[in-house]
Image: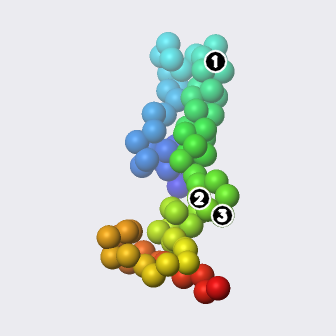
Amino acid sequence: MAVGDAAAQQNYPLVPDTGEDGKVKWGARELNRTRDFIANLKAGQPVGRGGYRTAAGITNGTSDPSPTYGLDGDIYLKVLS
C-alpha cells in the first residue's frame, strides 16, 4: 500500500506535495493536524475497567437483571453474597 492510501481510505486530508500548501513552511501545521487526529481517537477510548465494561455492554450488581436496563445482547453479572 502506498504512503497515504490508508489515510485517504479513512477520508483524512492528505498533505499536498505541490502548490502553496505543499511548501515546507507548513510542515508544523500538518504535524499538528496528525496529532489532533491521534488526540481525537484517544479521547474516544474508554478509561479503566469500568469504562471498558460499559463500552462492551457489561454491567454487574447484586439484584436480578432488569429487562428494562441495557440492550439485547448485553451481559449482566450478578454478584452472589
Most distant residue in the bottom direction: 80
Q: Secondary structure at mark 2?
A: helix
Q: Amino acid at mark 2?
A: Gly
| Most foreground residue, 27 or 41 | 41
Colouring used for the render: rainbow
**Percent position of residue 63, x then y:** 49, 78
Name the residue tied to disc 1.
24
Where is 5 relative to 23, above or below? below
Name the residue tied to disc 2.
51
Q: Is residue 26 left or right of residue 10?
A: right
Q: Amino acid at mark 3?
A: Arg
First in sequence: mark 1 vs mark 3: 1
Name the residue tied to disc 3.
49
- Which mark lies nearer to you, 1 or 3? 3
Residue at (61, 86) in percent of width and height: 80
**Percent position of residue 65, x then y:** 43, 79
Where is 17 relative to 55, above or below? above
Q: What is the CA distance from the residue labelled 1 to the residue labelled 3?
A: 44 Å
- For the residues bearing labels 1 and 3, Cβ distance under 8 angstroms: no
**Percent position of residue 71, x then y:** 35, 70
Q: How many marks?
A: 3
- Does residue 77 appear in this view? no
Q: Is residue 49 left or right of residue 33?
A: right
Q: Amino acid at mark 1?
A: Val
| Most foreground residue, 65 or 5 | 65
- For the residues bearing labels 2 and 3, Cβ distance under 8 angstroms: yes
Residue at (32, 70) in percent of width and height: 68
- Which mark lies nearer to you, 1 or 2? 2
First in sequence: mark 1 vs mark 2: 1
- For the residues bearing labels 1 and 2, Cβ distance under 8 angstroms: no
Q: Is residue 66 left or right of residue 41?
A: left
Residue at (63, 34) in percent of width and height: 35
